[in-house]
Image (cartoon, rainbow, N blue to C red):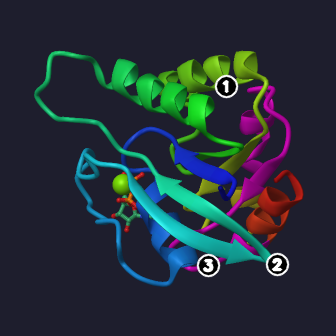
Amino acid sequence: MKPLVAIVGRPNVGKSTLFNRLIGRRIALVEDQPGVTRDRHYADAAWGGRAFTFIDTGGFVPGEKDSLLKQVREQAQLAVEECDVIIFVTDGREGVTGADEAVAKYLRKSGKPVIVAVNKLDTTSGQMQSLTADFYKMGLGEVHAMSAEHGLGVPGLFDEVVEKL
Ligand code: GDP
Ligand code: MG
């Protein structure tokens, strides 16, 4: 069986955009409204000669009584149980949120290799990059600035992923 790499994070941070970018097809639905990806999407992927199975997680179901935070954390839990490397996607424009903190706390305890991807940094200006500083404080190690939409920082992120496989 190929190693499993999962993308986790709260809704609307760009998980499906990142997934589609690596896969090169629009398998996962990208939507402006949070909560569209109900199912998990699996695809065979490869980077730098390493093959793996790539998983886009979702699971936030609007209107259900479970809080958003709980649902996002459950996704992270599933990823920790079944995956070899986790990409934790966050929104660099919004900064670290309560839901991010909750997921980070859980991921830290898991001991699984985690790479933090700070998304929506569409320009390379110093001001945008300085926004990544708070994400280091979550204590998960490596932090990568990127723009899934424009492809900035994405190759470096996947170099790091395959190093951990
Ligand atoms: P998910 O809920 O985490 O899967 O997020 P999606 O991939 O569905 O994206 C949510 C929204 O963020 C969509 O409107 C995307 O077009 C937008 N988005 C994703 N990546 C970027 C990015 O790098 N920069 C900007 N500006 N918007 C992005
Ligand atoms: Mg999605």
| Element on which disc 2 rests | loop
Q: Which residue does the image show at 28% across and 51% down from the upper left?
A: 37
* Residue projecting furthest to the bottom: 24
Instruction: Tell me the amino acid under the disc marked 1.
Output: Leu
Q: Is residue 152 magenta?
A: yes
Report the Cα–Cα distance between label 1 and label 2: 26 Å
**Which is nearer the N-term, disc 1 or disc 2?**
2
Percent from the top left, x then y, of residue 13?
A: 46, 51
* Circle 3: element type: loop
Q: Which residue is mark 1?
A: 107
Q: Is residue 14 left or right of residue 70?
A: right
- Give residue 82's mark: none
Q: Residue at x 50, y 54 (%)?
A: 55
Label 1 sits on a secondary structure element that is helix
In terms of depth relative to the viewer, which is nearer, 83 or 159? 83
Give the residue type at disc 2: Gly
Residue on which the image places disc 2: 48
Based on the displayed image, in which of its 4 quarters is residue 51 positioned?
Answer: bottom right
Q: Is residue 73 magenta?
A: no
Residue 44 visible, this orientation:
yes
In the rendered structure, which amino acid carries the disc numbered 3? Gly
Report the magenta residues as a range: 130-155
Q: Which mark is residue 151?
A: 3
Q: Earlier in the sequence, mark 1 or mark 3?
A: 1
Residue 152 against residue 158 in the figure, above or below: below
